[in-house]
Amino acid sequence: MAIEWNDKQPIYLQLREMVVERVLDGSFAEGAPVPSVRQVSSDYQINHLTVAKAYQELVDMGLLEKRRGLGMFVVPGARELLNRTEKKKFIETELPAFAQRVQALGIGLDEIARRLREMGEKH
């Protein structure tokens, strides 16, 4: 699977976010190993130090743990921690930006609510 890295943020942050998404969607299960630094480096053609930096940030965030001689593993409770963190980030950062955009475009709250309900019904 080819990944297209964007120039808007460093690759290690994009990789970190990719791992976060995989923990959230269950692709990387709690207690399970994540691909090794060497494997990720090879698969995505990026420097192993970049991968190591992304993984270290995930360790610092309390989402991954190093097991000597075994590799990196998703910590039990990581998904719940991420859900809380991501919800807080959405409420504090993304929602205000969304609300500001809605207001600037003159879209009514009733229309937004209706569209959100419709989207929810499709999923």
Image (tube, rainbow, N blue to C red):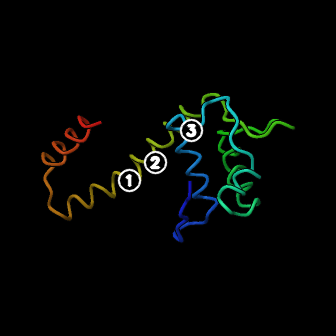
| Pointer 2 or 3: first along the chain | 3
Q: Which residue is mark 3?
A: 23
Say which residue appears at 18% left-offset and 43% top-offset: 113
Q: Which picture quadrant has residue 65?
A: top right
Q: Amino acid at mark 1?
A: Glu
Q: Nearer the viewer, mark 2 or mark 3?
A: 3
Give the number of the disc on residue 2. none
Say which residue appears at 55% left-offset and 42% top-offset: 22
Q: Amino acid at mark 2?
A: Lys
Residue 24 lies, in percent from the top left, at: 51, 38
The answer to whether residue 119 is left or right of residue 88 is left
Q: Nearer the viewer, mark 1 or mark 3?
A: 3
The answer to whether residue 87 is left or right of residue 61 is left
Q: Amino acid at mark 3?
A: Val
Mark 1 is surrounded, within 10 Å at the Cα level, by few (under 14), some (14 to 19) or many (20 or more) other residues, namely few
Q: Secondary structure at mark 1?
A: helix
Q: Is residue 51 above or below residue 28?
A: below
Q: Farthest residue to the bottom: give it.
A: 7
Q: Which residue is mark 2?
A: 89
Residue 25 lies, in percent from the top left, at: 49, 37
Front residue of 112/20: it is 20
Q: Which residue is mark 1?
A: 94
